[in-house]
Image (cartoon, helix red, strand yellow):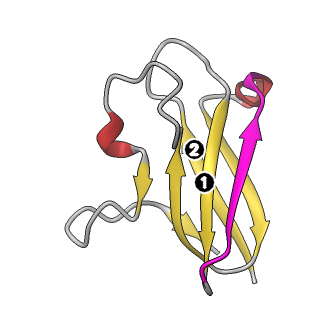
Amino acid sequence: ARTAIYLSNRGSMVMPAELRITYAGGRMETVKLPVEMWNQGERFSYRVNGRVTRVEVDPRRALPDTRRSNNTWPRSAAAPARLER
C-alpha cells in the first residue's frame, strides 16, 4: 500500500523537516526532507510504501517550533489528522 503524508508550513519561516515514520508491524524509519521542499508551496506530500500507523515531525526537537502539539499523527481520536492512502 502507498501512503501519502501531508505536511503544511503554518509559520513564516521555512525549515527542513525530519519525520519519524512508524509502519504497521512496528518498523520505524527516519526521513530528512530538505528545506527546498517548500519551493513547491505551503503544502508538501511525502509518499511511502506501506501502511503508516504513526508520524512524528522533528522527533529530536532540534528545530524551533511554536506549537509542538501538532507534530504527531495521530494526535487523538478527538482531533483527526490528515493522512491519506
Mark 1 / mark 2, whichever is N-terminal: 2
Residue 10, given in percent of the width and then of the height, sits at 44, 28
Q: Amino acid at mark 2?
A: Leu
Residue where numbered disc 2 is placed: 7
Q: Amino acid at mark 1?
A: Arg
Residue 78, given in percent of the width and then of the height, sits at 19, 67
Position of 49 compared to 68: left or right? right
**For the point 62% across and 87% down, which residue is it?**
25
The magenta span reads 26-35
Residue 24, given in percent of the width and then of the height, sits at 60, 84
Residue where numbered disc 1 is placed: 20
**For the point 52% across and 37% down, which residue is it?**
60
- Rate crowding at label 2 as few (under 14), some (14 to 19) or many (20 or more) other CA atoms within 10 Å: some
- Rate crowding at label 1 as few (under 14), some (14 to 19) or many (20 or more) other CA atoms within 10 Å: some
Question: Up-down: is 64 above or below 60?
Answer: above
User: Relative to the observer, which residue lies in front, 84 or 33?
Assistant: 33
What distance separates the C-alpha of mark 1 from that of mark 2?
13 Å
- Magenta residue check for 67: no
Which one is closest to the eye, mark 1 or mark 2?
A: 1
Q: Quadrant of the N terminus?
A: bottom right
